[in-house]
């Protein structure tokens, strides 16, 4: 049984092919540029050529792609975008037009001259991934499921903070299901407000097996819980230090005890230590994070989590985890199944096991017995 897990971040997209016939450490993996970084490169090259651009496709991650689009507009070269593509940069299309990007209808886009370079926006490209594996003689024709993670602020109403909107969403789902896999959905059950997740579903129309989509940060933290040392803890604090966002969860027997989410670019090690200490103490307030331009904080269990500095105070994952190298909290850099970079993929697998019971027992058995059994990959007969 095979499951393709794709964790799409700002810097990289991390891809893991789970195969229940081999030890999980032997699963094939790819760490490649993120879609927004790829779009960034294409737009920068078009700017250098003074070429007009049309952005089509669906809503995807912004950041680098948005910066390159704004740079292109400032250069004086024309840049057009359909409404769905433009929402990659801001749900408010007036704000997108203020960047110098001209919004056009689908009909207008079709009628633009051939000299305008078409750039399709999408986070998930199943064909490209399939073709890449095929180049290495690995077939994805026999998948049992596909799971994809992206970060989604949600479509906040006009005039409502997207940071607050996302935290309202997090709070609602934790209160309904106090577990990290509450942020994973069947393709046909994604909330209307989660426009980026829904765009992934739209892009995956060529996937003919069950599709699970999930938020990236809970996926990474869930994946980190499979590190052997982290797994031993009944109560633990885990921080995912991502390229754009840092999210920390305090977990215990009852589930999620508290969390905060901030923008990584606004943090340094002392500030992060301060926030994590407050989260452990149960004293962290929403405004402590939100008023400093982060997303916010939630405390569900005020009981203090004693930080066992002799072992480790906080487990850390994420591509910018080096931010905590000098931390006073004795950080432990979690390596589930020996690979930090695909923590999110392991979290996706665990969530897929929760949502797809027919696959769950097999996935859970593999994740529980990693390194203890299995067939060497060269003995697998397709």
Image (tube, rainbow, N blue to C red):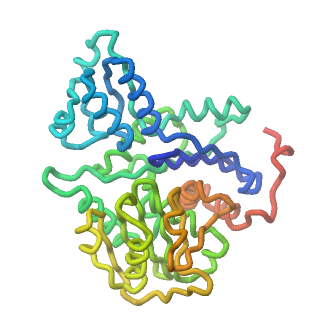
Q: Quadrant of the C terminus?
A: top right
Residue at the (20%, 30%) spot, across then down: 100
Residue at the (21%, 37%) spot, across then down: 96
Vertical position of residue 20 compared to residue 169: above or below: above
Q: Position of residue 215 (x, y in %)?
A: 42, 55
Vertical position of residue 225 compared to residue 362: above or below: below
Q: Give the side of residue 60 with respect to residue 252, left or right.
A: left
Residue at the (43%, 27%) spot, across then down: 42
> Does the rendering let one see residue 356?
no
Q: Position of residue 206 (x, y in %)?
A: 50, 32
Residue at the (36%, 70%) spot, across then down: 260
Total numbered labels placed on residues in the image:
0
Q: Give the side of residue 240 with respect to residue 283, left or right.
A: right
Which residue appears farthest toward the right when viewing the image?
379
Q: Position of residue 28 (x, y in %)?
A: 69, 46
263 or 107: nearer the viewer: 263
48 or 2: nearer the viewer: 48
Vertical position of residue 104 compared to residue 7: above or below: above
Q: Position of residue 101 (x, y in %)?
A: 23, 30
> Does the rendering let one see residue 181?
yes
Which residue appears farthest toward the top when viewing the image?
114
Q: Give the side of residue 139 with respect to residue 279, left or right.
A: right
Q: Give the side of residue 244 with respect to residue 253, left or right.
A: left
């Amino acid at each position: 049984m095979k499951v393709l897990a794709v964790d799409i971040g700002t810097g990289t997209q991390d891809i893991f092919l789970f195969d229940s016939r081999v030890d999980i450490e032997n699963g094939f993996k790819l760490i490649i540029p993120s879609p927004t970084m790829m779009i960034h490169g294409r737009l920068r090259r078009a700017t250098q050529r003074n070429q007009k651009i049309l952005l089509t496709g669906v809503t995807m991650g912004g950041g680098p792609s948005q910066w390159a689009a704004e740079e292109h507009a400032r250069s004086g070269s024309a840049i057009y975008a359909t409404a769905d593509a433009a929402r990659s940069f801001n749900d408010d299309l007036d704000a997108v037009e203020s960047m110098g990007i001209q919004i056009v209808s689908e009909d207008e886009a079709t009628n633009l001259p051939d000299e305008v370079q078409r750039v399709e926006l999408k986070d998930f490209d199943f064909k490209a991934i399939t073709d890449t594996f095929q180049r290495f003689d690995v077939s994805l024709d026999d998948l049992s499921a596909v799971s994809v993670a992206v970060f989604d602020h949600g479509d906040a109403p006009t005039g409502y903070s997207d940071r607050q909107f996302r935290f309202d969403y997090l709070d609602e789902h934790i209160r309904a299901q106090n577990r990290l896999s509450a942020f994973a959905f069947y393709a046909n059950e994604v909330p209307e407000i989660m426009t980026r997740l829904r765009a992934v579903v739209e892009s995956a129309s060529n996937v003919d097996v069950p599709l699970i989509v999930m938020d990236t940060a809970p996926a990474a933290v869930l994946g980190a819980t499979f590190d052997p040392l982290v797994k031993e803890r009944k109560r633990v604090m885990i921080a995912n230090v991502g390229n754009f966002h840092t999210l920390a969860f305090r977990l215990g027997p009852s589930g999620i005890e508290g969390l905060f989410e901030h923008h990584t670019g606004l943090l340094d090690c002392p500030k992060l230590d301060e926030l994590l200490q407050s989260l452990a103490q149960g004293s962290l307030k929403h405004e402590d994070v939100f008023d400093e331009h982060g997303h916010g904080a939630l405390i569900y269990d005020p009981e203090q989590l004693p930080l066992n500095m002799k072992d480790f105070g906080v487990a850390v994952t994420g591509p910018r985890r080096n931010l905590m190298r000098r931390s006073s909290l004795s950080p432990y850099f979690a390596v589930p199944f020996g690979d930090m970079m695909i923590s999110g993929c392991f979290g996706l697998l665990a969530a897929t096991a929760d949502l797809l019971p027919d696959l769950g027992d097999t996935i859970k058995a593999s994740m529980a017995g990693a390194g203890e059994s299995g067939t060497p990959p060269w003995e697998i007969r397709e």
